[in-house]
Amino acid sequence: MTTRELEVPATAPPSGPVATILGPFLPVDRPEPRTPTGFYTDTTICIGCKACEVACKQWNQLPSDGMHWSGDSYDNTESLSATSWRHVKFIEQFASAGTQGPSRWLMMSDVCKHCTAAPCQHACPTGAIIYNEFSNVYIQPDICNGCAYCIAACPFGVITRSNLDGHAHKCTLCYDRQRDGLVPACAKACPTASIQFGPIDELRDRARRRVEELKSRGTSSAYLYGDAPTENYSNLHSFYLLVDRPSTYGLPESPFNPWLRMRGDYLRSLFGGLAGIVVLLIVWTLRMP
Amino acid sequence: MPGLGASFGRGAATNTQQDFINSDCILIMGSNMAEAHPVGFRWPMKAKERGATLIHVDPRYSRTSAHCDLFVGIRTGSDIAFLGGLINYVLTHERWFKEYVLAYTNASVLIEQGYKDTEDLDGLFSGFNRESRSYDASEGHWGYEGSPGDRPDDAEETREAAGRGGQGIHGYGLMGGAISHGQPRSEMTAAPAGEPPRDPTLKHPRCVMQILRRHFARYTPETVARVCGCSAEEFTRVAELLCENSGRDRTSMIVYAVGWTQHTTGVQMIRAASILQLLLGNIGRPGGGIMAMRGHSSIQGSSDVPTLYDLLPGYLPQPAADPGHDTLDGYIEHEGLPTGYWVHFRKFVVSLLKAYYGEAAQPENDFRYDWLPRIDGDYSQLLTFERMSRGEMTGYLVLGQNPAGGGPNAGLHRAGLRQLDWLVVVDWFPTETATFWKNDPDAPTPDQIKTEVFLIPAASSPEKEGTLTNTQRLLQWHSKALDPPDDCRSDAWFVYNLGKRLRALYSGSTDPKDQPLLNLTWDYDHKSPQRLPDGTLSRIEGEPDIDRILREINGRKLDEIDPRTGRPRLLSGFSELKDDGSTDSGCWLYGGVYPEPERNRAADRKVNPGQGIQPDWGFAWPDNRRIMYNRASADPEGRPWSDRKKLIWWDEAQQRWVGHDEPDFEPEKPPGYRPAPDAEGMEAIAGDEPFIMKPDGVAWLFAPGAIKDGPLPAHYEPVESPVGNRLYPDVAHSPTVRLLRGPLNPLADTPTPEFPVVAFTFRLTEHYLSGPMSRFNGWLNELQPEMFVELSPELAEERGIEHGGWLTVRSPRGRIEARAMVTRRIRPLLVEGRTVHQIGLPFHWGYAGASVGGNANDLTSVLADPNVSMHEAKTFTCQVEPGRLAGPVARPTVPPTAWPDTRPIPETPTASQPEGKFVRSEPPQ
């Protein structure tokens, strides 16, 4: 079977026994940067059909996570994980009988946010996590050593480590399909176009127009999550149109990039350590006869 | 389907799903479209994005309700009360579309003097026979004044054959005309002088409009609220939205599915919706109409080229064992109609017989009409299983169906299967039906079951080619991508080769009864070996050539050879059919799908972005008309009702109908055309009569005889109901329903304290029907892994049931266990001043597969409505208790598939293998 993706490397990879050993240390041509791409998920038209979950698992040949009835509305896969890269959330908001209040059932297809400045990428000690030519965050499982730093770093709880192979896995934004000029499997399968894929700038424009339109029709609570950077976090290459607080959807109200605390943390540890030494020295000096 | 057929002339969805985007208001009722038709639901969502209002009226707050602007919760089975209320609202507030109703419906027609309404007879129409529990339309004087059926009560001359009428024969067979009760179909509508008497002022007490006003007067908002369990304000809001969004400049659409049809009054629910849409002027117009969302793949196709017991292809009734049907002429006289499009009945029948019997069918032998089997009773699915359970059948073939899991009162279906000598199941997986003898936890041990079961492995859709005809009557061709594995074969292969072997078995026989089989056209072999898309030859031997079958369905001019092919020339459409045996056609309705060699229009795939009508994507019957009755999109003079809603119009310069769709009308008949008094056929249809399948060219608000349980819809309670009938206290449930009560099918006397809870079944997106196609798949099972029941916190508290715990549901037919999904999406209703609890059961589980569980259909009942022998699985009564069932429970019959395929994709480098296939060893179990 020939696929266009085989043509992507500009030069043939070196072969032979020496190259096999030295290969990983030899420089290779980086692919040319392409137009940054991403997802725009309009939760107001998500019908909770989970076609995205199934399409993702089928295309990427991910295992079923087993059969566990959660009782949490219609959500039985419960979270994103190394084996579930798309996850549809169901939020039932119904006032108790006889009282006035909201009655709505929110649905949202969650996925890796593909942050422009990704804490997981910063945290990865092996270089397994990279930004690929589409500016998507991609884990190279064969380089991942399973240290799990990325899991702690991700403020969205996207990444987990598979107990099948000990490596971290997450949405690749269908890197393989994109290289073949195809739309990612979830966006392709979405029947209502709640999940939209495309050049990220175009998506942002489209999403902002949609918010204006919704507001003009009376949905004043509509807003975009992650389309623009905040003081503490970069923008996301997978952003959402929401109609309730982020925490309702299980998203952090204001995500914080741990990297921003890094200088202070280093300084604090340095000065803390130094202060400790000074204290020890003083104690030791005082105890000297 | 007879609901739509009787009202408009054709029993199919009037518009296309793409046309949703042209709608201003969409009422979804009796359908859970987002969950059951998620792909089609794209279009209502697009309409919503364009500003349309979406309304959901349903017993359960579902994923559909979540996306509608307004949700109104009602009691299951109370739909006619709600729709009747809407009709009454439109009439009393004078919100009906006057020009449309006057011109395009039978509102002004006078009905026979002897007709008595439910208003006069306390809930019954005239013509009811208490002994046979059926109506006789002519006895009840449902006909038009002056029609041949209009005679005084003492004239008995032609009534002798009517006794059998009303019970089952020819249920689906109704496209257009009145039903055959022994008399000709035209009996009730044709007036001797052509046009029936009318009162255009609509003042005459016997005109349809006045009958309608009287009939629906008692459906007030307050009554609706009391019967349905919603509030009068919610009801009024729905009525206002529909009225605001209908008229010259706006259109509303109604969507239904099996939430309407699976009731004893289902046909009348659809009739009520038809009346409402006609009064609002929404039929035949873009963004209007009634969308019948079909339940599974190609189900529309299987009534067009029917797998139904009482129909021949193209909605021709199966001849009955009835003196009137003895000869071809008699059959045509009884079933054809002298006016309207059915005047071509003889062409359709003769061309079908030519397709069936080829050279053997000749004018001098009536084209072998005598070879067609005659029906003498109700052989519908439910009645057949009822007979089977009484041991009256020996063998059964099941293709693409799972009656042991999905049949209503599935326990009765399994009891029936245990009575058989042999059973053949053709399927992908060992389904409930294929394994009833060993896996049914309620059954005797296998050594006590005599049935010999053969499971034949079937091919899946990418492994075969053919057409699918779905909701919008659209034939779409799908190609074969690869050969099926091992011994799996397509259903067509199975049927074709079965036929071949049967013919070989009887070859040389001179017995007259074997001649139909031996003379049947049965040569569908591939002329050259079938090629797969990758260029290799198919390894399957004996696969029939589906392309040839489609050409036969399309029809041919037998006396004209096409020089391009050396074979008879293909017909360009059904208008070319002849009644002298010089044409053949396997289904006249599909005429034009294959108009020329190499031009299979079902395979057309051209898209014009942003348009509601996509004429070059697939082929829609009839004649690629996407919106049926579209002559009604223009006013009587042929001008569009408004610029915003224009579809087709009369072009004075070209002297023909032009526009965005194929006209569903004679293309060159001017709006001003008036028929001569004695005109027949299409000449009898005036230039402003859009419903060409109807003998009088107009849609029927009042159905003179086409429906077996009354000319107008009336609210009757479900057979199992928690309350009596408030609207007609003397008649609890539909008077014409067949109860089929028996030891295997006990019914609750209602209302009864033993079964106080109302139950309904529903469908989840994650599973498909009774589950054979989804419960063997790990990716789907993880999404909905267990049977559950949805109930309100109030009922849960009353019964001591905890969310996530177990509960048992008991009906007169059986009991099942399930997990409790306690949710505020289900609300107790205030019906007749007291609280009624409803529970919802998904019907996807059974005892075969990787995910097994309680089968909701073990609780449902077998009943038969008079028109289509439909059951009432959408509503029954039950009792709910906490805890699990005692006794054996189903165990998974196959191990869970961690993921279906761990083999690397061949000839693909490691780097290009699927990303997630990170473990190349066998997955842990």
Image: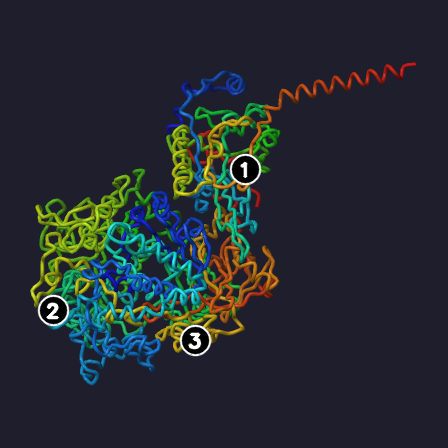
Task: Please identify, in this view, whether the residue under mark 3 or under mark 2 is nearer the observer.
Answer: 2
What residue is pinned by disc 2?
A: B194
Residue at the front extreme? B93
Q: Which residue is at the front of the view, B456 or B626?
A: B626
**Marks 1 & 3, CB-CB < 8 Å contact:** no
In the displayed structure image, the side of residue B393 where residue A105 appears, left or right = right
- Farthest residue in the bottom direction? B154
Q: To which chain does the residue with label 1 belong?
A: A
Disc 2: CA contacts within 10 A as few (<14), some (14-19) or many (>=20): some
Q: In which quarter of the image is the N terminus of chain A?
A: top left
- Tell me the residue at 42%/59% (across/down): B233
Q: Position of residue B278 (x, y in %)?
A: 26, 60
Label 3 sits on what residue type?
A: Arg
Q: In this view, does A59 lie to the left or right of B709?
A: right
Q: Where A64 sits versus B267, above or below?
A: above
Decide which of B561, B852 is in the foreground and name it: B852
Q: Give amino acid for label 1.
A: Leu
- Sequence order check, earlier mark of 3 and 2: 2
Determine which residue is flagged by label 1.
A251
User: For the residue labelled by badge 2, is the local secondary structure a helix, a strand or a loop?
Assistant: loop
Q: Residue at x 59, y 64 (%)?
A: B798
Could you say whether the residue bearing mark 1 is in a helix, strand or loop?
loop
Q: In the rendered image, which quarter is residue B256 located in?
A: bottom left
B489 on left or right of B334: right
Identify residue for label 3: B741
Q: Mark 2 lies on which chain?
A: B
The answer to whether the residue labelled 3 contacts the one labelled 2, judged by CB atoms less than 8 Å apart, is: no
Q: Which chain carries label 3?
A: B
Task: Give the tally of numbered discs.
Answer: 3
Query: Marks 1 and 2, how far apart in space?
Result: 71 Å
